[in-house]
Image (cartoon, rainbow, N blue to C red):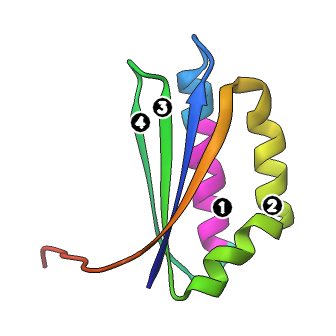
Amino acid sequence: MHVAEFTLHAKPGHFDELAELYSAFARDFLSIQPELETVLILGDEAQGIVRGIGIFDEEAAADAVNSNPEFAAFNEAASPLLASPSERVELKLLHSYVKV
């Protein structure tokens, strides 16, 4: 399993719009990407941060997201709402605990 974290910094007054855009993208992207297992969208309105965490079956699938046309369209749509460039970090998933 592999994790891709993608953090966006909203311009003042645009947190809700950016969070909605990111959430809609994540929902739709999850439905068309078989290698994508889980997506979490997190936010800190006070700091204007909207962060997505995607869990992929393998590293190659996480790497391929950058060249995906849907991801490029999302970045283009989000761009006017951003205060600074987005940040992307890839991590190896060490453990996942789920309450059953």
Amino acid found under the numbered disc labelled 1: Asp
Task: Say whether marks 1 and 2 touch (CB < 8 Å).
Answer: yes
Q: Is residue 16 left or right of residue 77?
A: left
Under circle 3, the secondary element is strand
Q: Is residue 21 left or right of residue 56?
A: right
Whether residue 34 is visible here, answered yes or no, is no
Work out whether mark 1 precedes mark 2 in sequence or the reverse, and give the earlier one: 1
Distance from disc 3 to disc 4, alpha carbons, whole Å, reads: 6 Å
Under circle 1, the secondary element is helix
Residue at 50%, 37% in the rendered image: 50
Q: Please state the extent of the stretch shown in magenta in the rendering.
A: 20-31
Work out whether mark 4 precedes mark 2 in sequence or the reverse, and give the earlier one: 4
* Quarter-of-image position of residue 61: bottom right
Of circles 1 and 2, the one toward us is 2
Q: Is residue 45 left or right of residue 100?
A: right
Of circles 3 and 4, the one toward us is 3
Residue 94 included in the magenta stretch of the image: no
Under circle 4, the secondary element is strand
Where the N terminus falls, by quadrant?
Answer: bottom left
From what the image shows, is residue 29 above or below residue 36?
above
- Judging by the rendered image, the residue that carries numbered circle 3 is 49
Work out whether mark 3 precedes mark 1 in sequence or the reverse, and give the earlier one: 1
Residue 3 in the image: state x and y as whole percent. Answer: 47, 71
Which label belongs to residue 43?
Answer: 4
- Judging by the rendered image, the residue that carries numbered circle 2 is 70
Amino acid found under the numbered disc labelled 3: Ile
